[in-house]
Amino acid sequence: MLDSSRQPVLVGNGDWDQFTVVAPGDLNNDGTPDLWLRHNSTGDLYRTYGAKGPDGYLDPTTWGAANTRVRVGTGFKSSLYPTIGSVGDTDDDGYADLWTRKSDNTMHGWPGKEPGADGVTLGTPYLIEGITGGSRIPAGTSLGAGQSYSSRSMKLTMQDDGNLVITSRAGKVVWEAGTDGNIGAKAQMQTDGNLAVISSTGARLWSTNLVQKAEDGPGTVTPGLTDNGYAILQDRGNLVLYNAKGQSLWATGSVIRHDYNNDGRSDMADWYDYSDGHDELHVFPALSNGTFNNPIHAWETAAGNYWADHMKRVTGDFNGDGIGDVAAFYGYDTGQVALRTWLGKGDGSFSAPFASWSTKPGNWTFDHIYAQAGDFNGDGRDDIAAWYAYGDGSDKLYTFTANTKGGFNTPFSSVYRAEGWTAERMKFATGDYNGDGRDDLGALYGYSDGHVKLITFPSKPTGGFNEPIHGWESTGWTFSNASIYSGDFNGDGRDDIASWYDYGDGHDAVISFNPSGADGKFGNRQEILNITADSYERSRMQLVTGDYNGDGRDDLATVYGYSDGRVKTITWTAKADGTLSSSLHSWEAPADTWTFTRMHMIERYSPA
């Protein structure tokens, strides 16, 4: 071993040819680097600590002491995993993580964890497939007036007036830097990892303004910031900054969710359970003013193939192509559970479903699953998070990351509670609440003493979740009177949570909660819609959020089942200040043609 001032040192004995050496960093926080040693033939992974010698420098011979090696993993034979390595702690949980490349060229990751009774320090593996399509903007790139990058759903343009804008397929600006009036300005993907707009005189007009630590200057402290980061204008519409490790750090929040016909506007979809036993998926295409056209018959199946009450449905872009898809957990009478995907074709219809994950009877109980969809690892594909409520009172949060085909990988867990949480007291939503380009999990929790609280579970780069952050709370709300939804109603690039609240006296209101800090904590309570008494009955509504007019702000829409048997779509579009406009009524089905209770509207998260 060599450095700038010391002589070569023999490290260990003559068995190094049996191992692949991995450098995960300082594993025990003693200020000296440590190693992992993969035994190539047995697949065992050993930890060997480094230590300082009498001179205060690292004594590398300590790495080679066979009697101090501790086995921390198994199953990593070189015949299965020709390449193995580590870049340290990628998810900031205090434990180094491992990556491998298999002989079939696929990459897998193992999150680090506290050693168990068996000494193993690695958790459940997950597939690493990289970031799905879009236009990559490397460090050092400049965009001058009139120049642009395009993805399947959006265009990023440096306008002649000096404004950097993102325009949707619907022809509307959904995000802007606000730097108009500066002719000659250019956009730069800077080598320090920030995106900026620079004037013709060299002044910085706008920037993502990320700093690694507070002493680096004013800005948003982002520990994951590295030099030579890059940006991707994703096919799903989001402009996301990544560090050199491929971890998302910042995003414009310009993704258009559940756009099934590829026109730049969100649409609605339902699963309809017909009385003769057959089932269909319908799509309600949104028009330019946010109202809805007649539904499209998007996919159908014969009687006896599916039971609607055996499904937990979510929507998302699971293959990252910018077109909305549908996925569902299906619980069979045998006790088996499977996860299926219906890929959107882009014309408002869906391909035949396929299953990518299933479990045998006795492993997962269908009724214990609470499914939510979002891009939790920032790779441009929506994943599924499953809050699982065990029969013994414990709870665990699993992530099914999506693969490039729109199917799902084997789940891994993150947050766990042996007791203290009750899933029936939680109403879930998903969105990017801290603006880092990864969706998070939000929940309204109703405590046994009557008070309620909004909670955020921020996502990690792996797609797992951090410990919860507690936000707004109240003793004046009734949990059963609130239902929650998620969307960026004010267009600031971060999702909000909105609650449709039934006051019990006949009138209702929609209350919005904006993230009040960079960590995604909820505060900033604002009433964004007040509904006069006896206008609507909450039990007759199935609400879905989305950007239905394509203006970059999420709106609220519903199908409404009237007492006389009619069914109608209603939209409340969002204004620039985040409040909602008066209702817009559109498609209507006469009595006895559609049955409201047979419609199952599909959201990104479990209906509340």
Image: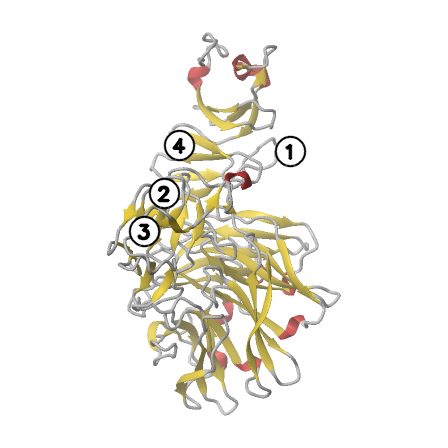
**Element under disc 3:** loop
Q: Amino acid at mark 1?
A: Ala
Say left or right for 293 vs 511.
left
In the picture of the structure, the residue carrying the numbered disc 4 is 80
**Name of the residue lying farthest toward the top:** 7
Image coordinates for residue 462, horizontal then vertical, percent: 48, 45
Query: What's the mark number on residue 190?
Result: 2
Callout in the foreground (1, 2): 2
Query: Do the numbered discs 4 and 2 sit on residues whose CB atoms are within 8 Å?
Result: no
Callout in the foreground (3, 4): 3
Residue nearer the viewer, 53 or 396: 53
Say left or right for 520 vs 193.
right
How far apart marks 4 and 1 lie (CA) works out to: 26 Å
In the picture of the structure, the residue carrying the numbered disc 1 is 117
Q: How many numbered marks does the figure carry?
A: 4
Whether residue 380 is visible: no
Residue nearer the viewer, 287 or 370: 287
How far apart marks 1 and 3 lie (CA) works out to: 42 Å
Q: Amino acid at mark 2?
A: Gln
**Element under disc 4:** loop
